[in-house]
Each structure stands twice: as C-alpha cells, then as structure tokens.
Image: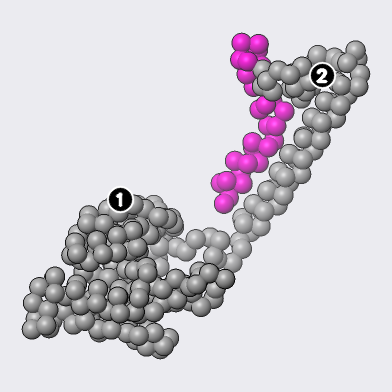
Amino acid sequence: MAERLRIGVLASGGGTNLQAIVDACRDGWVNAEVVVVVSDVECGALERARKAGIPAVWVDRRDKARYPDREAFDRKVREELDRHQVELVCLAGYLRIMTEELIEAYAGRMMNIHPALLPSFGGPGMWGHHVHQAVLDYGCKVSGCTVHFVTLETDGGPIIVQRAVPVDRGAAGAHPAQGAMSPPREQSAPSADARLTRIIQAFLGVMVSLQFLYFLAYSWRMAAFPGQLDYGEGPILQIALRVARGQTMYPPLDQGYPYVIASYLPGYYLLSALAVKLT
C-alpha cells in the first residue's frame, strides 16, 4: 500500500470541513492523514484537532510583536507546515489572504474549499455566511461548493471538483447557511421518487438488452437467409441490412431515414426523460 499523504489544514472557524477531512482519512476513503492544523485564531477547528490527537498550532494574528506584517505571519505558518513535513495543504474555512511567498511554496499542492459554485460568489469578502446570504439575495435556485487549487487570484484557481445542491429558501432562518442548502438527494433516505427512478432504470436496461437481441437476431437471419429479406420489416432490419453489407450503421439523411434510431426506441427516450426528471 502506498505511503499515506501528509495533509496540513489551515482553518479559522468551527472546523466542520476539517472534521470531514479527518473522518475521510480515518475511514479509509482517502489514503492520507492530517498531520497538523494551523489557525490564526483560537477556534473550534483547533479544539477538534486536539480531540483527534492532531497537533494544533495557533499563530496569533494579533501578536504584532512577533508578526508585524503578513509576510512574517505566513513565514511562521510555512515553518509549521514544513516542520510537520506537509505534502498537501487544505484551506478549510481559512479567512486570511495569503502572501505570494506561501502560495508559491505550495503551488499545485494547496487546495481551498469554497461554499459556492465558483466563479459565482467568489473573491474578496465572499466567505462563510456572506456567501450564502449573497446566494439567497440573488435568488439562486442552486448553490453548492467548490474545491480548487489556490493561486494568487482569490478564489480564482483551477477548479478540481464541484457539487451542486438545491436552495430551499423556506428553510433559511437567522443563519442562511443552516438549512437553506439542502443536502444532495443521494445522501438522504431514499424517497418514493428515488425508488421509482431505480425501477425505471432497471426497466430501461431490460428494454435495451431486448432491442440488442432483436438486432442480433435480424443480423443472423439476414446472413443465413439473404433471399428472404423484406425491406419493409422495420428500422431494426434496415440497420442490420447495412451492417451486413459493410455500410455504416446509420443511413444517411438523404435516404429518408433521419429518425431510424428514435423510431424503434420511443419508449426508451420517454422513460429516460422521466428518470432524469425524478433524479
């Protein structure tokens, strides 16, 4: 088994994203381990790290004697990351704009979690509940989260992965991040719609298999009894005919068969559309 990737987490809040990373590592979802958590404030993320037995480092941003500027502060952060031999840095609710020196030191090895679908609702000032409030104010029907590489442009690095969720405006209370963004459906208990979708998908699989067998039967019949073919027996036979002759599977449009495929699977398309709607 490959050696586990060493992750350093920078955080400034309660540490829910940190906890997700820690749990994923310990449950074996990712072959990695969190080796240090660094924060600019004494916060819940540090407490979570301590409870998990992970080194927790508080670099106090208010200590101007030690850290008179951003450069001095980030040098200390980098020192802690290097001391724990960090290979990948994850920003999990880290509320500081980092210096070029720190970003370049981990170029291609620093990721950020942003609570919106970038490039929307990103940039300076867009963090935490400010993002969710902006999403609600704009009237968005979906929101989500983005994981991206960190570059010198705030929230502007290459996107790694995104996940969308519906916005439930009726659930938004005093704190817009709580309840306003519904979890993805596959993480919830299966609903009647979800069960119906699975039934439809299974039916589609059977339908496609039968149509394929039908196609093979006509192909065999054509090869075995070429003199008994009837050109008027339907689009499946027309396709099989062209395959046996070494022609393309789909007849050109000028031969009058532009809908040859759709004509023999109308039920498939109808059920496909219904399955997508229910998903």
In three-dimensional space, the C-alpha distance between marks 1 and 2, rounded to whole angstroms, equals: 54 Å
Residue 79 on image: x %, y %: 24, 77
The magenta-colored residue range is: 252-279
Say which mark, if any, is on residue 233.
2
Asked which secondary structure carries label 1, the reply is loop
Using the rendered image of the protein, determine whether residue 123 is visible from the camera's viewpoint.
Answer: no
Taking 228 as reference, is 172 above or below it?
below
Q: Is residue 108 left or right of residue 252?
A: left
Residue picked out by circle 1 = 119
Please name whichever residue, 271 or 125, is drawn nearer the observer in this view of the structure: 125
Residue 265 on image: x %, y %: 70, 32
Residue 258 on image: x %, y %: 62, 18
Give the amino acid type for the residue marked by disc 2 in the picture: Glu
Query: In the rendered structure, does residue 79 fall within the stretch colored magenta?
Result: no
Name the quadrant containing residue 177: bottom left
Please name whichever residue, 107 or 19, is drawn nearer the observer in this view of the structure: 107
Using the rendered image of the protein, determine whether residue 181 is visible from the camera's viewpoint.
Answer: yes
| Residue at position x 59%, y 67% in the image | 189
Outermost residue to the top: 254
Q: Give the dominant element type of the magenta stretch: helix, strand or loop.
A: helix
| Residue at position x 82%, y 25% in the image | 219
**Mark 1 vs mark 2: in front:** 1
| Residue at position x 85%, y 14% in the image | 230
- Count the marks: how many? 2
Name the quadrant containing residue 210: top right
Asked which secondary structure carries label 2, the reply is loop
Taking 109 as reference, is 139 above or below it?
above
